[in-house]
Amino acid sequence: MTQEQALNILKSGANVFLTGEPGAGKTFVINQYVAWLEAAGLHVAVTASTGIAATHIGGMTIHSWSGFGIKDSLTPYDLEQIASREKIVRRIKKVQVLVIDEISMLDGRALDMVDQILRTVRQSEEAFGGIQIVCIGDFFQLPPITKQGDILVYAFESKAWRNLNPLICYLSEQHRQEDEMLLGLLSSIRRNEIEEEHYTLLEEQKEIEYENIEPTRLYTHNADVDSVNATELTKLAGPAKRYTMNRTGRKQLVEGMIRTCLSPEQLILREDAMVMCTKNNFEAGYVNGTLGRVIHFDGGFPMIETTDGKQILIKPVSWEMVEDNKVLASIEQLPLRLAWAITVHKSQGMSLDAAEVDLSKAFVYGQGYVALSRVRTLAGLKILGMHPNALQVDPKIVAQDLKFHSDSESAEDAYDKMEDEEVEEMQTRFVVALGGKVPSDEEVLETKKGEKRQKSVVENTHETTKNLLLDGKDTEGIALIRNMTVMTVWTHVEKLAEEGELNMSILQQLEPTEVDWEFAKAILFDALDEHGVEKLKPIFEAAKEKYEYPLVRLARMEYKLERGLAKSATTKDIEKSKKGREKARSTNSAANKTEGQEVW
C-alpha cells in the first residue's frame, strides 16, 4: 500500500494499524494525518508506548495519557480513581482521535487497560469509547518489556485489539535502505528464512567501506555504551565544553522527558568528538541519526562536520510535551549525543550512515533485526560479534505478518474500487460528524508550519499547480514540492482542464511511458463513449481494471478535450489525438489477432 492510499483510509475515520518495514514512511504518513486533523478542527492525542518514542513525536506515553501509569492491571477501585481525576477525564472526553506510536512495544494487557479506561470515562460500550484509534509500528521491532516470569502478550493478541478490529495499512514503499542485498537480508529475517549464506554474508562485513566516516557502535547493553563513549572522550585533547539541559513545566513530566531524551542532561564535548544528531531539523540539514564530528566552537556552540562534508552550527532546540496545542513541559538542549556507541534500543527509529554492530549478547527477539536495519547499505556495516540466535524473530510475528499483508491487500482493493467522490464523501462525513470542517491544502500547510497566513496573500492552489505543470513537473513531483497527496494534484489538474486552463499538450506531458498510452486511451475512450464521463468506476471496470484510476482520470480529461466538452480543446489537438489513437488501435488489434489473443 502506498502512503497516499493509507492517508486516504485514515481520513475516513476507520480504526487503523499503520505498519511497514523500517523506512517505509510510517512517521511521514502519521504526521500528514495529524496536521489534517488539526486543520479540520478535531482533537487528536498523540501518544507512544515508550518515553523515547513519545519524545520523538512530541507527545506523552499512553500510560501517562490514560492514567494507569505503571499498573499491570486495573481493579474496579483503580478504574473509579482514574475516572475521578478531572484532568484525565477532561482529556479523554475531549479527544476524538487517539494515536499510539510504537505499538509493538506496548504489552497487550496495557492496551486492554486503555480500552477499559476510555469506555468507562466516555460511558460507552464501544471499543475505546467509540473514538478513532490509530496504532503505528512494526512487530518485528523490539517487543514489550516484561517482568521475569510474565508471559509476553503482543498488542494484537489482546481483547482490545480484537474489539477494535483495525484496518491494516501495510506500507510497501522503501525510503531508507539503498542496498538490494541488505534489503534481501532483512526480508529473509522477517520471513524467518535465515540460511547459512546470510551468516556468511554478515561475517564478511569486517570493514566500513566509506572513507572519513567513524561508525557508531551498537551494543545491546548500556554498560558497554557508557564505557566506550567515556573512554573515547578522554582520549581527546583540548578544553571540554559542558552544556546543561534547561527545563520548564511540572517536575514529574520534565523528569520523564529527561530520562527518555536521546540528548543527555549534561553534555560534555571536545573538539574532534564524534557526535550524533538526536532530532530532525531538515532546514538546518540534519536528522535524527546524522553523524558528525565537532571541528570547532563558534560563539560557544559546536560546529560539526557531517559525513558528507557539510558543516552545521548546532544550536539548542526544545522537546515539548503537548496536549491540545498547550505545552505541558519542555526541555532544551543541544540536539547531540556522543556517538562512538549507542544501544540498539535507543537506535530504534534512526537511520545511520555507518555502524559497527555487536550482537554477541543479543538476548531478545528482534534485536538483530533492529540493529541491521539502522544502516542504509552493507558498505556502512561492520559486524563485531554475532550470537547464534541474533537474527531470530518470533515465529508468532512471522505468522501474524502474513495475515497483516493479506488484510492490507483487502483494504487496498476495497478502497481502490471506490469512486473518488465516494471516498471524499466518507471523509467529509467523518469530519462533520465530529464537528469539524474538511480543510483545504493551505489550511493543512498552515497547521504544519504552526502559523496563520493572511488569506489575501495565499496564492490560488490551482494556479500554483498550473505553474508547476507549465514548468514541466509531473504529478508526483508537484505533490512532493507542495507537500500534498498525488490524488489531490490530479484533482487540481482535472479542475484546471475543465476550466480551460490546460490544453492537450500540457496533458500529454502527464501521459505514462510504461504503457502504450494510445492503445490504452482507445480502450478507455470506448468505455467513455458507452458509460459517459460522470463516473470513473464504470470506466475502470469496463477496461477490466487494467489501468489505475489516475490514468482513467487522464483519459477522461483528454476525452473531454477531444469531444469539445472542455474550453481548451482545439481542432488541431483533436485531430492529432484521434489519428494517434486509431493507429494504436489498428496496430494492437493486428498483433493480438496474429497471436490468437482476444481483442477487447
Image: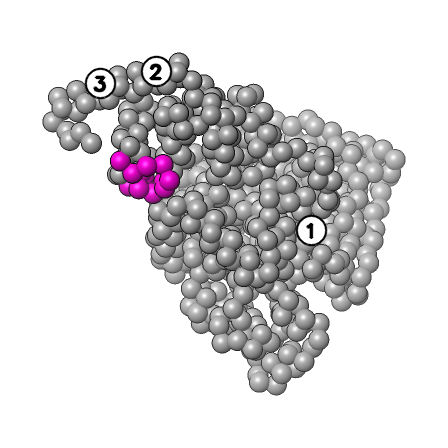
| Residue 266 x %, y % | 80, 52
Which of the two discs, 3 and 2, labels the residue nearer the N terminus? 2
Q: Looking at the picture, which amino acid does disc 1 mark?
A: Leu
Give the alpha-carbon distance from disc 1 to disc 3, as whole Å: 63 Å
**Which residue does the image show at 29% across and 20% down from the upper left?**
581
The quarter in which the C terminus is drawn is top left
Q: Is residue 72 above or below residue 411?
A: below
| Residue 330 x %, y % | 77, 56
The chosen color scheme is one colour
Dot label at residue 404: none
Q: Do labels 1 and 3 touch, CB within 8 Å?
A: no
Q: Read off the residue under disc 2.
A: 575
Q: Is residue 519 above or below residue 154?
A: above
Dot label at residue 587: 3
Q: Read off the residue under disc 1.
A: 262
- Looking at the rendered structure, the secondary structure element under dot 1 is loop
**Which residue does the image show at 69% across and 51% down from the upper left?**
262
Which of the two discs, 1 and 3, labels the residue nearer the N terminus? 1
In magenta, the rendered stretch is: 530-541
